[in-house]
Image (spheres, rainbow, N blue to C red):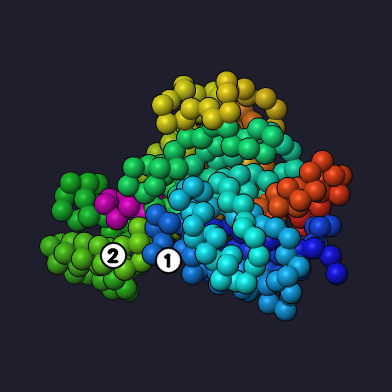
């Protein structure tokens, strides 16, 4: 029986794991809750659960290597190694940035760029399958502009502003109240509704972490598609910020302190721009706006299976320069995502 390789994609709201053969065939899949150390209380537990799910029915002794794609890779290494040990695996996994596995899960090209907008948001330049420049990805409090959390926070704020008169009237009052408090909540009077919303939002964030705010992103996106001007403004601003991030990492925008090259002088080079994260891969109004703007400047590729991208890196690391690794990579990104 041949060697097996593990690929893990740990996002803000979910973790996916695949176990693959050296030819790129998927032998197992697992899924669990989020693994972002900033927004999830116990990321190691979710990493372990996804690993065990993917390894069910397989011999852990066959696993010859693994790659974890995680936000804040340096900080996340301890959680990954703990989950690896607790899953009964020998050795240590490699831990790379989650944006890198988003790129390798969409294309077998060595160079390009990636823009992610899901729970969080980040852009990165990739050269020889390494991150050489990045922008944003600073977490919900300091950045992640255009992300699900960014959208959700602004949706809640817009609803509260409309209730007390600081903002324009918007359907977000009723939509956010229903999402947070349940059906019929918007019928309360202004002060009572404000107090109920504020208490509930803070309680949810305290209980589930800031990633919970991302659950309001579909609310504002749907309102924007229906023509609500306040929601349209929020989504348009998210698109502008995401496009600015993309321009920085593709060499079109100004060099900023937070987006310095990590591998020497920045070079645009060839390669696709991968759009990743649910807000850009699903048919959202935000995706429509971002694609319309960036599609004029770059070849856009939709992200597919980030966990498979991590597994492809694991196979390539085990078989450096071997044509079998390149073929396995192509097989992996061509397979249907479960």
Residue for badge 2: 206
Q: Which image quarter is the C terminus in?
A: bottom right
Q: Residues within 10 Å of mark 2 (few under 14, many from 20)?
A: few
Q: Quadrant of the N terminus?
A: bottom right
Q: Is residue 155 magenta?
A: yes
Residue located 42% across and 31% down the image: 258
Which is nearer the eye, 234 or 210?
210
Foreground residue among 257 and 94? 94
Q: Could you tell me how many numbered marks the image carries? A: 2
The kind of secondary structure element at disc 1 is: loop
The residue at which mark 1 appears reads as 42
Q: Residue at x 36, y 54 (%)?
A: 152
In the rendered image of this protein, does residue 53 appear above or below residue 124?
below
Above or below residue 37? Residue 19 is: below
Which stretch is magenta?
151-158
Residue 80, position in %: x, y?
54, 59
What SS does tag 2 mark?
helix
Sequence order check, earlier mark of 2 and 1:
1
**Circle nearer the viewer, 2 or 1:** 1
Kindly tell me whether residue 115 is visible in this rendering: yes
Q: Is residue 215 left or right of residue 130?
A: left
Is 80 situated left or right of 2 in this image? left
* Residue 301 x/y as whole percent: 67, 42
């Amino acid at each position: 029986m041949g060697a097996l390789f593990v690929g893990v994609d740990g996002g803000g709201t979910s973790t996916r794991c695949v176990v693959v053969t050296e030819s790129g065939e998927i032998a197992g899949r697992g899924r669990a809750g989020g693994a972002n150390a900033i927004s999830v209380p116990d990321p190691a537990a979710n990493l372990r659960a996804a690993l065990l799910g993917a390894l069910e029915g397989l011999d852990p002794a066959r696993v010859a290597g693994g790659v974890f794609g995680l936000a804040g890779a340096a900080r996340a290494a301890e959680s990954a190694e703990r989950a690896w040990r607790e899953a009964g695996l020998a050795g240590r996994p490699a831990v790379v940035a989650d944006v890198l596995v988003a790129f390798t899960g969409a294309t077998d090209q060595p160079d390009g760029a990636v823009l992610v907008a899901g729970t969080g948001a980040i852009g990165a330049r990739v050269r020889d399958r390494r991150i050489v420049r990045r922008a944003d990805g600073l977490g919900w409090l300091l950045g992640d502009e255009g992300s699900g959390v960014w959208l959700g926070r602004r949706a809640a704020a817009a609803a509260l502003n409309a209730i007390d008169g600081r903002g324009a009237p918007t359907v977000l009052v009723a939509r956010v109240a229903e999402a947070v408090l349940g059906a019929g909540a918007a019928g309360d009077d202004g002060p009572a509704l404000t107090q109920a919303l504020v208490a509930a939002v803070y309680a949810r964030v305290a209980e589930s972490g800031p990633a919970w705010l991302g659950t309001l992103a579909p609310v504002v996106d749907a309102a924007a598609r229906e023509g609500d001007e306040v929601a349209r403004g929020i989504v348009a601003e998210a698109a502008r910020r995401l496009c600015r991030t993309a321009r920085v990492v593709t060499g079109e925008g100004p060099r900023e302190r937070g987006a310095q090259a990590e591998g020497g002088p920045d070079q645009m080079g060839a390669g696709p721009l991968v759009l990743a994260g649910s807000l850009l891969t699903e048919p959202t109004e935000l995706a429509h706006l971002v694609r319309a703007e960036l599609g004029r400047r770059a070849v856009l590729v939709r992200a597919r299976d980030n966990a498979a991208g991590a597994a492809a890196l694991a196979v390539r690391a085990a078989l450096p320069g071997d044509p079998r690794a390149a073929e396995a990579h192509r097989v992996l990104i061509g397979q249907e995502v479960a």
